[in-house]
Amino acid sequence: MTSPRSPFPATGRSWTDLQSEIRSRSGQDLAWRDGRTPLFVFRNDQATYEVGRDAYFECFSENALGRKRAFFGIASMEQDVLDFGLDLFNAPEGGAGAFTSGGSESIFIAMKAARDAHRARVGQGAGTRLNIVVPITVHPAFDKAADAMDLEMRRAPLRDDYRVDPIAMAELIDGNTAAIVGSAPCFPHGVIDPIEELSEVALAYGTWLHVDACVGGWIAPFFTRNGRPTPDFDFRFPGVRSISADLHKFGFCPKPASTVFYRDEADLERATFKADAWPSGSFSTATLAGTRPGGAVAGAWAVLNYLGEEGYRDAAARLAAMVDQYCEGIEAIEGLRLWSRPDVSIINFGSDTLNILAVAERMMARGWLPGLTRTPRGMHAMLSMLHDGQAREDYLHDLRACVEDVRSDPMQTSKLEAVY
């Protein structure tokens, strides 16, 4: 039985009334400000949040689609953001990028560029079905792109360290492979794939290597600069041809904001959508979206300039220290173990002796949204500074209590399933 439709409003309402209802409806949300969600929201500190918010509303009405014809301030800020990313990811001269709405869009247009580059290289038309070779841990955004462009997904298994096996990937490549993919880090297990080895595979087979750094891209380099061992993943490896990196994750910028970068400006041109058949003349965008919020560009530009290298190194240091505290706390609970040691801020842990889903179900009853993985069965969280302090102490306290409760339950049953 479907719910009744809400009728179109017959009269207008005051902002005071609307604001009250918004807050009332949102009052049923999970307490995400207290770190109760394992993903969706990413926070550095209150000051960074306010800079991004205020900059967003400075350009609330501007449309980034018109940046070259009307909104020249948005155009200049967008170019600064892209230049910052090209510098951060060691792009060579001639590299280029695009500002997108999120990782899914960044990935989509990178795969479009890879598809078109393959067709140009081998002289194929649209009649031949191409494939992309990916780790089994790759983000579903690649499935979405493959579905839209009729690309076959070929999935490679992992090594014992939960990173993709480059040898297995190479065995899946054939003459119709448009791209291979590595993650930095992968979402399920929080580890960075062996990008240097994948670069060698890409060069040997003459195929495109895309690095999905949507999670780690804008923060992992500062882990490295702080002296924390973090695998490299960027254009310093010659086989890397494109990189996706979300600003609204660990760049701590307002949503929606992501970036995609190409080793060569010609690949940005391949990614660009063009039309010239209608009466209004030629139309082109380097993104899937046409209209884009100018506020997202201004917010990203402001946050990147507000923090600078010093601020991001400080954020990386605090984030790394917090992740270590979570890992130590989890490993101190009898029966739990990390499935992998996180390279950035995603933790994934489980148990050889307990039903971890039963633990997760009890955590849910205590007001936590448990992130889950299916293979291996585990609990999962993408930690930001919302999860520090009291949230960390409460989480580890409740986790220990739930583990002990499950240990004393001979049935250890659960109806939970892993859902992103």
Image: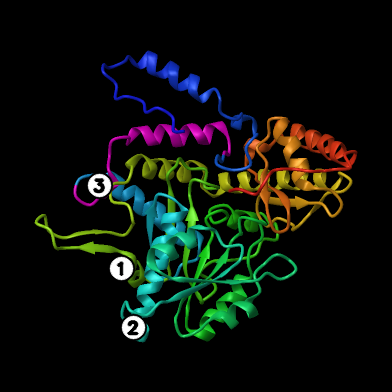
Q: Is residue 272 above or below residue 346?
A: below
Which mark is drawn over residue 269?
1
Task: Return the residue found at the far front.
Answer: 1
Give the distance between the C-alpha atoms of the residues marked 1 and 3, in whole angstroms. 21 Å
User: In percent of the image, x 39 and y 35: which residue is there?
Assistant: 55
Q: Which of marks 1 and 3 is in front?
A: 1
* Tag 2 secondary structure: loop
Residue 287 % position (x, y): 33, 57
Earlier in the chain: of badge 1 and badge 2, it is: 2
Picture mark count = 3
Residue designated by label 3: 72
Q: What stretch is highlighted in magenta?
A: 43-69
SS for dot 3: helix
The residue labelled by disc 2 is 124
Q: Which amino acid does label 3 sit on?
A: Phe
Query: Which residue appears at 76% of the width and 35% of the height?
Result: 362
In the image, 244: left or right of 353? left
Query: Which quadrant would residue 278 be assigned to in this image?
Result: bottom left
